[in-house]
Amino acid sequence: MTMRLAAAVVVMVVVAAAAMSVEAELSVDYYKKSCPGVENVVRYHVAKALKANRKEGAALVRLIFHDCFVRGCDASVLLDPTPENPHTEKTAPINIGLAAFELIDEIKAAVEERCPGVVSCADIVIYAARDASILLSNGHVHFDVLAGRLDGRVSRAADAQRDLPDSTFTISELIRNFRRKNFTIEELVILSGAHAVGVGHCSSLRARLTAPPEQILPGYRSLLAGKCAAGEDPIVPNNVRDEDPAAVAATIPSFLPKLRKFEFLDNSYYHNNLARIVTFNSDWQLLTEKEARGHVHEYADNGTLWDEDFSDALVKLSKLPLPPKAKGEIRHHCRRVNTHHY
């Protein structure tokens, strides 16, 4: 082997090792010795929060996506603006309505009391989203969390605006956006199913108020228009099954029997989509492309399959790494970077 060839092989091995290192460093038993019982602590606080307010669950599930799709799973979405950095990710317009930050603070404080300086905020976000998914789905969505992430020191609103899919996107824009993160059309459809729970702001669904009947059920359009006229930027449930019965009775009375008492993470999103009763333009867009439309039908027909595939998609999402050469740390407080500098 020539010196030049040998050097090339070494470079290839180093690059491959670097690409694998993030996943290799993550493990299910990462805190087994350094912070035993950490998952029980997170689970306790998530269960307590959802018992008090079930909507916290959807907020946690949304948080994993909005964190991991921007600079990897590094808890950068948790960082508060500062005079030095007034425009962190959580200030980005696309992150409107992000919540559960106080719950993450509460969990972090409990974990720090148990194991100071050991467990990252990034791992806590993943643990909490997993536990929320389990509770919201009555155990049908479940997966083991690979842990060992570091918290990022960089958080920019511009990165969130660039990387996160917008509710106004066309199917081509959605596919391109997900492909940049190595997610398939099928995984785009799978992760969109999270809209079975949670709420959206009227500013994110304005286009739906003037969409034609072939894109939205006219009764549902009337319901949304009425709710969105009630204030500057009101919120509405992502899932019509969680709507106010009076509003449904006035606009789509035939849907009243399908209303539910509690938010539930299931395949109802796909049934709603096929009935043209979904909140965002990006939801309806899944029906405009052959492969995506096929998967909407597939998951409407098979809720168990969606439970399994959604669990797998969250695991894949949780593996998105920090950018190359990015520095990480274990934050003492999730809302701010540690004061030392590298």
Image (cartoon, rainbow, N blue to C red):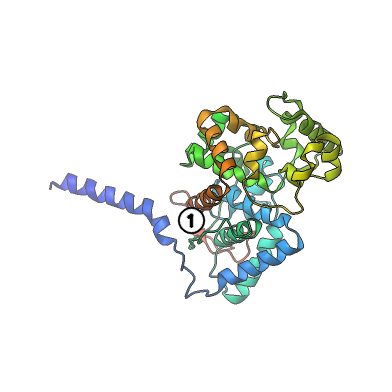
The residue carrying mark 1 is 327
Quarter holding residue 207:
top right
Frontmost residue, 322 versus 132: 132
Q: Position of residue 128 (x, y in %)?
A: 61, 61
Q: Position of residue 171 (x, y in %)?
A: 57, 30
**Where 326 falls versus 203 (above or below)?**
below
Q: Position of residue 118 (x, y in %)?
A: 53, 70
Q: Is residue 298 left or right of residue 251?
A: left
Q: Residue at x 50, y 39 (%)?
A: 186
Q: Position of residue 105 (x, y in %)?
A: 67, 63
Quarter holding residue 201:
top right
Answer whether residue 155 is visible to the viewer in this image. Answer: no
**Where 109 falls versus 265 (above or below)?**
below
Q: Amino acid at mark 1?
A: Lys
Frontmost residue, 162 versus 241: 241
Q: Residue at x 75, y 59 (%)?
A: 53
Answer whether residue 39 is visible to the viewer in this image. Answer: yes
